[in-house]
Image (tube, rainbow, N blue to C red):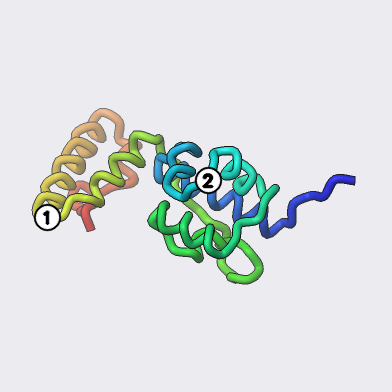
């Protein structure tokens, strides 16, 4: 009889996969950052292999997340399951790049440009304007 992964390991593995994808990283790229093979990361992501405390710490550092993000949805945290917005890899790369911009004025300028584009498109397709008001600053 084959052992099945513990439900907590499956939750943590699913969170790892979501965080990795949200960061726009391949299994290979994340593996290089933490010193394990992509196959090992696949096993972590499926819950087949447990993640040690030191590996969890390294993964969180590589993903730029808090350890609680990895454990979200487990009984120990009492937190709701991890919920990340559905976004394309391009959008995630853009968000990561945006976060690297140090100047507040530059970030605000980019925010205004994007907001203006959204407002312009909303004139043609009003349903797209529901998420962002024209005066709303997305750089906050």
Q: Position of residue 110 (x, y in %)?
A: 15, 44
Q: Nearer the viewer, residue 119 or 108?
A: 108
The residue that label 1 is drawn on is 103
The residue at 48%/37% (across/down) is 28
45 to the left or right of 67 = right
Tell me the distance, in whole angstroms, between the alpha carbons under discs 1 and 2. 36 Å
- Mark in the foreground, 1 or 2: 2
Find residue 89 and name its label. Answer: none
Residue closest to the far top: 124
Q: Residues within 10 Å of mark 1 (few under 14, many from 20)?
A: few
User: Under tag 2, what secondary structure?
Assistant: loop
131 to the left or right of 5 = left
Quadrant assignment, res 17 = top right
Find residue 36 and name its label. Answer: 2
Quadrant assignment, res 91 = top left
The residue at 21%/39% (across/down) is 119
Q: Nearer the viewer, residue 81 or 125?
A: 81
Q: Is residue 33 above or below residue 72?
A: above
């Amino acid at each position: 009889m084959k052992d099945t992964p513990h439900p907590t390991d499956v939750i943590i593995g699913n969170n790892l996969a979501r965080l990795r994808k949200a960061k726009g990283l391949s299994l290979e790229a994340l593996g290089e950052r933490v010193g394990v093979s992509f196959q090992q990361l696949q096993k972590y992501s499926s819950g087949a292999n447990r993640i040690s405390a030191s590996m969890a710490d390294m993964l969180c550092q590589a993903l730029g997340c808090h350890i609680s993000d990895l454990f979200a949805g487990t009984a120990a945290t009492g937190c709701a399951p991890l919920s990340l917005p559905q976004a394309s890899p391009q959008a995630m790369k853009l968000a990561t790049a945006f976060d690297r911009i140090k100047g507040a004025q530059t970030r605000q300028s980019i925010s205004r440009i994007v907001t203006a584009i959204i407002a312009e498109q909303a004139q043609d397709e009003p349903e797209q304007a529901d998420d962002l008001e024209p005066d709303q600053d997305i750089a906050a």
